[in-house]
Amino acid sequence: MTKEQINKLLTAGQFPEPCNPVLVETHISWVVIGDHYVYKIKKPVHYSFLDFSTLEKRKFYCEREIALNKRLTEDLYLGVQPVRLLSGGYIIGGEKGEIVDFSVEMRKIDNDLQMDVMLPKNSVTKDDIRRLAEKIASFHKHTTIMYDKDLFDIQKKFNDLGSEKPILIESINRSMGAVIDRAIKVSNEFTHKNISLLTNRLNNGYVRDCHGDLHTRNIFLFPNPQPFDCIEFNDDYRQIDVLNEIAFLCMDLDAAGRQDLSDLFVKFYNDLFPAMRTAEEYQLFVYYKSYRANIRAKVNSLRARSAGNETEKTDWLRQSEGYLKLMEQYINLLNSE
């Protein structure tokens, strides 16, 4: 679908339930939020890391998204609904009309239960962290082990931050260029120095088919926590070391000023699934946290490029700067050893 067609769906479309739909747009999806249900429609885009360019591919990845997310959620992902064109109007669901696209249908959940919303209210408890650690550790224990992965893939992704250096230098300050250059240098040295550790972890089954995007915005803290919105569009982003997986969540907690919760999660998780047993593995965990801060800095820089106004651009760049500083803190820990 196009943005024009999406707008027509919003203003004059038909939904399985009567509702007043609201649109949330990302760089790869249109998310139409109704009163009780949510419909996620993939944009017809083709990037180096994903391909939603054809109707068939979008249907495939809708089905893939549901199958993968059902591993960690209950009664949240409901199914794939066609988007149809009938008599000049757009309909989600039904049997009549030409299928023009597909949507992932989800149950709408109160966002007050999202972890990132709860954190500023200081309403995330020790029991929440324990239950979340239990959920993730159990998932990691039972998900598929991957034995054939590129050990230097993460280094390549880390180095991609260099492509954003010009805008970050220009828009934030020139010192960010030195921070990025040094981080890339330390990353290259660390991965080459620890190739035996990375190889052993791959051979010993610590690289698994994970969630891939485990941060606080993607977790509903029910009594049985529900991590959602895992990565379906690229297996390499999801099939990672389990330490890389939990590093994203812990980096996110560190960024929110809750290192206490980050440390608590690691303790609970590692007691249940001992994935970090040595000083070298702890250093690897810190490296993965630097990588996750790196990725967040890059993503926010890209968002700043496409911001609709200067206020929005400034906000994204401010967040990017914060993640660069956090990345630098982690890099300093690696460099101090």
Image: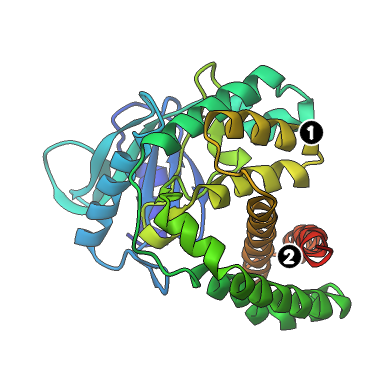
In the picture of the structure, the residue carrying the numbered disc 2 is: 313
**Relative height, residue 97 to residue 323 (above, below):** above
Q: Residue at x 54, y 16 (%)?
A: 223
The residue that mark 1 highlights is 260
**Label 2 environment density (alpha carbons within 10 Å; few <14, some 14–19, many ≥20):** some
Q: Is residue 200 above or below residue 13?
A: below
Q: Position of residue 173 (x, y in %)?
A: 87, 76
Whether residue 95 sits left or right of residue 150 in the image: it is left
Name the foreground residue: 289 vs 15. 289
187 or 292, which lies in front?
Answer: 187
Residue at x 65% of width, y 48% of height: 278
Query: Which tag is nearer the camera, tag 2 or tag 1?
Result: 1
Residue type at mark 1?
Asp
**134 to the left or right of 141:** right
Measuring 62% from the left and 76% from the top, which residue is drawn there? 159
Identify which residue is drawn at 69% across, 28% down: 118
| Residue found farthest to the bottom | 166
Q: How is the image coloured?
A: rainbow
- Amino acid identity at mark 2: Lys
Element on which disc 1 rests: helix
Measured as percent of width and height from the top left, residue 93 is found at 22, 37
Residue 203 appears in the figure:
yes
The answer to which of marks 2 and 1 sits earlier in the sequence is 1
Q: Quadrant of residue 79?
A: top left
